Image: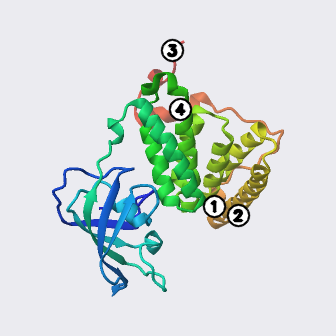
Amino acid sequence: HDVSLGKYDGAVLRKRLKEGAGPHRLHDTGRVRVRVLTVTSNRDKVSGRPFEVSFVAGDGEVCDAMEGAVLGLQEGDELMLRVMEPACCEGLIEIETPLEAPVMVHFTVLEVQQVPEKWDLAPPERLERAVARRHLAGRLFQAQRLRLAAKHYQEIASFLARPEDFKEQRAEALELRRVAFLNEAACMLQLGEMSHVKDLCDKVLKEEPEQPKALFRRAKALLALKEHQAAVEDLQRLKEVDPSNVAGQRLLRKAKEELRKQDRVSSKTYSKMCAGLGDFPEDLRAPKTSPNSLVEAPDLEEEYAKLSRETGVPLHRLKPVK
């Protein structure tokens, strides 16, 4: 089961070895206590004795691997993590040498605090939770905890999926959802998920067509995707709505240069393709005529007679009735 944060890319995989019998499952903001039994780095054991860790899910107190792994678990569960991105285990244990993939983490869940799931909250409570998680996600982003920050922005957007539920707070909910899309796009830009960045910015621009950050971030993603013409169009719109945006103007110059390079490559490719076709045979070439040449009209009687001989249809039936 892929429990990678931010994007499901196989960075952290979870296998349940034993099903627990606890009364609750862990949700975001709930406190959990786990016992880490062993940690291996590229098959070498790096942990000493088993140790316990207690933390609030989602607060960033532990590594990304553990943050993603514990959600949905219950007391008594025993699990094995296979971590292919060692950076996701950063801070799990103190060792002198960097961890190497695959990192295997064997742990059990000792205790789970019950907290309301998001759909158990009334709309005002959901909005309050989303605002609090937005502030936390901003701090995580500044600390380069990009995966966990992206996970929170995804959850915020999910909390606010139905703005009509918030009635008099609808405008606030819509704005917070747009911020979540934009900030998740900022995370995904650094994580290299350019198609996802484009999709997120599309959602924002559908509601706010001249949103400067959405135009800029989508243009960066489009450049990375080699969609240079579309990037130029976004950046030209950005220049119109925010003429003082220096970064946007700098990126526009780069996008135009990339588009010129693309056009030069396309032109060379077309020329080579045409050269490879060679010359047409003489009998397929268009007859050479001067601009003042007259076009000779065909002899209709002769054409009708020829058609009659070829088809066997009587001549009088071929001619139009006057």
Specify the amino acid type for callout 2.
Answer: Lys
Of pointers 3 and 4, the one earlier in the residue sequence: 4
- The percent coordinates of residue 131 (x first, y second) are 51, 40
Left or right of residue 77: residue 199: right
Q: Nearer the viewer, mark 3 or mark 1?
A: 1
Q: Indicate the secondary structure of the residue bearing disc 1.
A: loop
Q: Nearer the viewer, residue 33 or 251?
A: 33
Q: Position of residue 174 (x, y in %)?
A: 53, 32
Where residue 171 sits: x, y (%)?
55, 27
Q: Amino acid at mark 4?
A: Leu
Tell me how far mark 1 sits from mark 2, CA to CA: 25 Å
Q: CA distance from mark 2 to mark 4?
A: 48 Å
**Which circle, 2 or 4, is nearer the viewer?**
4
How many marks are shown on the rendered structure?
4
In terms of sequence position, does the residue under pointer 4 or pointer 1 come before the other?
4
Residue depth check, mark 1 versus mark 2: number of the one nearer the observer: 2
Numbered circle sitting on residue 268? 2
The crowding category of the residue bearing disc 1, from other C-alpha atoms within 10 Å (few below 14, some 14 to 19, many at least 20), is few
Q: Is residue 289 left or right of residue 32?
A: right
Q: Earlier in the sequence, mark 1 or mark 2?
A: 2
Residue 173 at x, y percent in the picture: 51, 32
Question: Separation of disc 3 and disc 1 at Cα?
Answer: 42 Å
For residue 281, which numbered disc appears in the image? Answer: 1
Q: Quadrant of the C terminus?
A: top right
- Which mark sits nearer the N-terminus, 2 or 4? 4
Front in this rendered view, residue 58 or 171:
58
Residue occupying image coordinates x 40% and y 73%: 84
* Disc nearer the start of the sequence (2/3): 2
Q: Which residue is mark 4?
A: 174
Residue 184 visible in the displayed image = no
